[in-house]
Image (cartoon, grey):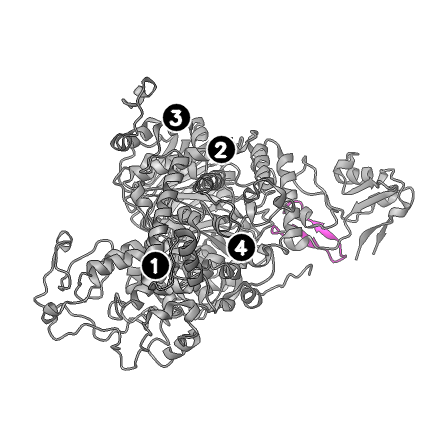
Amino acid sequence: MKRLAADSKKCSGCGACELACSKALFKVEDREKSAIRITARDEGGFDIAVCDQCGDCVWMCSAIALSIAPNGVVRLNRKACVGCLICIGECMRNYIFYNDEFQTPLKCSACGMCVKSCPTGALKIKE
Amino acid sequence: MPKNVEKVENDYRHHIAGRDELMAMKAKHRVLATYSFEPSIIERGYNSRSLYISVGGEYDISNQDELTSSVNGESGIVIGEKAVTEFMKEKFTGGKGFDLYHLWKSVREDTSWNAPVNNIVISPGPLAGITQYPGAGKSLVCSISPLTGLPFDSNVGGFFGPFLKFSGFDILELQGKAEEDLIIFIDGNSRTVSVETAPDEAVDSHILCEQLTEMYAENDDDRMCISVVSSGRAAEHSYIGCLNFSFFDKRRNCVRIKQAGRGGIGAVFRNKKIKAVVIRYRGVHGDSNNPVKKGLINAAGVRLHKEMAHLDTKQNNMRKIGTANIIEVMDRYDLLPTHNFQFGSHPETPKISSKVYIEKYVTQNVPDGCWYGCSMSCAKAADNFELRTGAYKGSKVCVDGPEYENAGGLGSNVGCFDPHWILEANFYCDTYGVDTISHGTMTAFAQECYQRGLYNLDDSEGLDMRWGNGYALNELMHQMTQGKGFGVIVGKGVRQMKRIFAERFGKVAPEFEHMLGSRTWQSIDEPFTDKPIPTAHFNKHLADCKFLKESGYDDEKVLGEIKGTILENAGANNDSAFIANPKRWEKIDGIPTISRDEIADYPVGKPYYSDDPICPYANGRPWVKMTPGQIAEMEEFGMENKGLEYSEYLMKESLAQQGGYALCNKGPQHDEAWLIFMDMVNNQIPTFEDKAEALHYFPMFRTWFGLLGLCKLPWNDVTPVNNKHEKEPAKFPEHVQNYFDIYEGVMGFRHNEASMIRQSERVYTFQRIFILRMGSGRREHDMPPIRSLGPITVDEYLSRKERYDKQLVELLGIDPSGMSVEDKIEKIMEYRKDQFRQLVDAVYKRRGWTPNGIPKLEKLIDIEMDLPELIRVIRPHLKEEGYWPMGTEFEKYEGM
């Protein structure tokens, strides 16, 4: 299964991945438009929230805009998506995001653009 | 496959013809009128225009709003538009409010349900169509009801309402009466409306909706863009017709239907000879409703989606089994209506519990929302369900169920504890176009009459109307589709049944027996076939749940007795093995034929012939009037009010719910108030004032859903974690705030509780005055059958003896020891009737009505509904009752 693997111990919190993601998705550098989110922990260090392609959201999509590709990635078909945001509610780890500017959720497709931007090697594409 | 999705292979397309044949069917349509409309932009929830269609016929439209544009087609068809004005938005908000506004403008005081001028108005409401918040796809439907003769509102899911709105209309008005079966097609993308003849399509919904979805979808993917409004063949011969609103369920790969069930609007639809309204709209997205502040909607939606995902499995299990989750809960709390609302539980309820449905019937374990974005997903279905009886015997179908009301109405209330029969009846109710709730309650009434000996097998034409006969439950409907048999009488509803039974089903008095000639009156114990029909155990203990087992009753045994008799294959075909009376009655010379006007003064017990325009079907036997005592007996347990059958909760132990039902504008339906737990279980509303406050707030709050196009279930069928710490937990304040958020998100205005209630009060009070205008709506019309107030039979008393004896001691200060059960019933019912009277007084006062139930002028001024049309209706009543106010500030209302 192809997915983005995150090692939060290595994360420096620089946010380069967020900007790379939003740029890949929307050609802007804005973490609020990114499908990966870095947050600082109170006790120090960082959390990396990004879809792990578990597929738990797929079953609740009545528009069938979410599906599991042969490589294991949970894909969002934006044309079919009606913007109900149920998938966000369904994600127990809160790994899917939304932005009021857009009609559809922000979800990692394991494209790997953030991996290239990460200076510490905290992110990897795993097959 | 993620989670527990269980893929069920099905192909319901085999029910209908192939694509080529469907296209040939479509080619037979004759287009009678077409209309093109301009695009529209939704602003603050409104398109500000409505679509008007008259399907033909002549009637007075002088009081109606003018058409802003229109075309006239063949056969008297008119298609046009009307404006939705700022006045309408301010006073009526939308949804049910808009529907009632147009209905008021269309009908007169004496308009009957089947007059061409009676219209069916469908409106989705300003919030309907948002995809982010659960339960935001409702359509509200209003018409003059055949059951009540009054303005009636019913709400329904499915995709039609949102599609109508996104196509450019806030309201669809259907008026007139066609000469031949028609369909109306609205294409929201090409912006055209057409009215076409449809000679070859089916009438029954499960076939018709599949046919039209395939016919009007441009390809397989486009099927999700089609929604159909339809009814069924039983709606043509009954008063309980429902409307089905379809949507294409992509996961199940089939068309699903949701019902505007109550009030008989499907009968109005078929009376107009409308076969279906089809809408197509492609392009739903998260902004389709063009909200003002989308962020508020998104945030509220995600909050509730999270609650559903985290809490539902621990709370109500709506996503797994829908409303059927409460079958066993209601049984446990003595609230599951059993044997025509006599009892609240039954030893055999485990046979129809939600667990049974989950294990044996409900399929796929997929989200079953009836509009996008519903994470509550309660619209469950049973795939590949094989039918045992009727027109589609042997066919494998998708049943839209189970639901709680169906299990109550088609199960416990008719004594049927077989989940298959309940689902079969559920399916046939839907596809034949009848209301499951009314069907259950009216069958239960007919069963109790039969078992009390008020009519016999001759009257029912061989239909065995004992508790638990699943064949009979379904056969009644099969007969309704044919317009013949006892089912046609039952299908007119409890109110008409009481009248019909009273006119026809009396016993011939000895002094008139000679008039029958060689025929003898069929007695209950006299089978009229060569194979004996089992003699019913007509003793009244049969009905007592607690003593059922002891008295030797069990469903299996009764059904076993049917084996080998004519009843075994009952309902196996549409000619019905039930209608097997070989000795059909021929006309007997010497028995007089009298007009309807003469029936009132005709002697009781003397045979006669007459006619009945409401129910022309008769089995040929002469009619005999019942005694006044028999008529009074039926009044006690005929569970209707205002002509509508009660829905399926046992109300008799909750005074607040007795009022919740009887004081409901349209008739006894729990969508206005469901106060049983607050009242009975949690004791949160102990005084009359508390109950009256609840019977003001909740009906108004729930009316609000109907104005906006929202479903009530996501409001309180999942409980926020902190709800128990709220000051008023019964109101689910956190969720109410969500509704204020989504209202502000769409409309740009922030409500508070007072402004929200005010918005509802305007429409609620308008509806009450509308009912008054149509000749009802006074205190006498709010009086319920006394079974709804407490125990009226010995069995009912004994089933809760401990509770009632305790109440005699604690509430009345009476020592029950040594009293007969009959005496105890008399005492406790006297007390309860008085309690109900006091409740009505308190509720009317809280609602701003007079003791006779008339809204006061001061109330109309207060809620800014002092409109001349309304003043004219209430003025004579207020003057008669002495409530017309004095003072110069009221003078202007004298001349209105």
Q: Secondary structure at mark 2?
A: loop
Amino acid type at mark 4: Ala
Q: Give yes or no for contact between labels 3 and 2 (Cβ–Cβ under 8 Å).
A: no
Q: Give the camera-side residue of B717 and B745.
A: B717
The numbered disc on residue A42 is none
Q: Tell me the element at label 4.
A: loop
Disc on the earlier residue, 3 or 2: 2
Between the C-alphas of marks 4 and 3, the distance is 42 Å
Q: Is residue B21 visible?
A: no
Query: Could you classify mark 2 by the number of other residues whose Cα lies within 10 Å: few (under 14), some (14-19), or many (20 or more)?
Result: many
Q: In percent of the image, x 33 and y 32: which residue is there?
A: B64
Distance of label 2 from label 4 (alpha carbons) = 29 Å
Mark nearest the camera among 1 and 3 is 1
Mark 4 and mark 3 on one chain? yes
Of the residues tagged 1 and 4, which is closer to the observer? 1
Q: Name the residue furthest left.
A: B590
| N-term-proximal mark, 2 vs 1 | 2
Residue bearing the label numbered 3? B861
Give the numbered dot on residue B379.
4
Q: Quadrant of residue B550?
A: bottom left
Q: Are marks 1 and 3 in contact (CB under 8 Å)?
A: no
Q: Disc 2 marks which residue?
A: B47
Above or below, A100 against B277 in this view is above
Residue B457 lies in magenta, yes or no? no
Left/right of residue B157 with respect to residue B232 in the rendered view: right
Q: CA distance from mark 3 to mark 2?
A: 29 Å
What range is drawn magenta here? A62-80
The residue to which callout 1 is attached is B825
Secondary structure under tag 3 reads helix
Give, as a three-letter code, the residue at label 2: Asn
Q: Is residue A11 visible in the rendered structure shown here?
A: yes
